[in-house]
Amino acid sequence: MKKIYVALSVLALCFASCKKEVKVEVDPGTVADTVTVVKEEAPEPEMDSIAQQKAWMAYGTPGEAHKMMAEETGSWTNEMTFWHGPDAKPMKATSTAEIKMILGGHYQEMNYKGDMMGMPFEGRSILAFDNTTKEYTSTWIDNMGTGMLVMKGTYDPATKAVNLKGEMVDPIRGKAVPCREVYTIVDAKTRKMEMFDTKNGNEYKSMEIVMKKK
């Protein structure tokens, strides 16, 4: 009987503690006007091993976009036109390009050679298509700079063009400026690449390359 009494006493004390009102004095000057409540996100459910394997297989298997890139494999001659500003006169140059697929057909590599402003010019681009994000990524390096141009975009089947956007460093102004590229599949043996730069907040066409497959 004594044990039951003690147990009931403990439960009564616990209940009283839970119901007891706690008063806290708060200085109104220290209370913020708004209170931000941060909710913890629920963890994403784990995929089973078979689903994970399928996801990686889909990510790493070249698809239709890579087949389209592979169709450009071969030698190309390029007619290049440059504009140094919105009202500048066009400058002409020629070059050649060798295109091939690398790393088991996962990426496209393009190597340019030619002359620009009386100097030998050499450049290289790598083009990737991400099966998961459905996005193209293009990188560019050449022997006339020390940086790398990176652009991303998507393919528009209506215009048969890949539309890319990124930033390029302007060494004269000492900062990165927005740029974009439109790469159009004209026909089986013709490609057109147009580059647009920004100057004083206005976009202008800075380069056009018409590529012909040999």
Image (cartoon, helix red, strand yellow):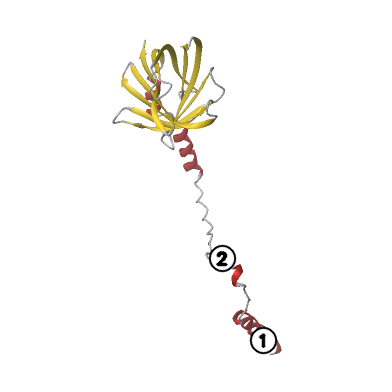
Mark 2 neighbour class, 10 Å CA radius: few under 14, some 14 to 19, many 20 or more: few
Name the residue: 61% across, 68% down.
Answer: 30
Residue 212 location (% of width, % of height): 35, 13
Q: Are marks 2 and 1 in contact (CB under 8 Å)?
A: no
* Residue, far left: 158
Look at mark 1 in the image and give the residue it sits on: 9
Residue 170 location (% of width, % of height): 51, 27
Name the residue: 66% across, 83% down.
Answer: 13
Q: Nearer the viewer, residue 9 or 207?
A: 207
Quadrant in which residue 25 is drawn: bottom right
Name the residue: 37% across, 29% down.
Answer: 162
Question: In which quadrant is the C terminus drawn?
Answer: top left
Q: Nearer the viewer, residue 65 or 150?
A: 150
* Residue 117 visible, this angle: yes
Q: On residue 156, which mark appears? A: none
Quadrant in which residue 203 is drawn: top left
* Residue, far right: 2
Q: Amino acid at mark 1?
A: Ser
Q: Amino acid at mark 2?
A: Ala
Q: Nearer the viewer, residue 77 or 188?
A: 77
* Residue 136 visible, this angle: no
Look at mark 2 in the image and give the residue it sits on: 32
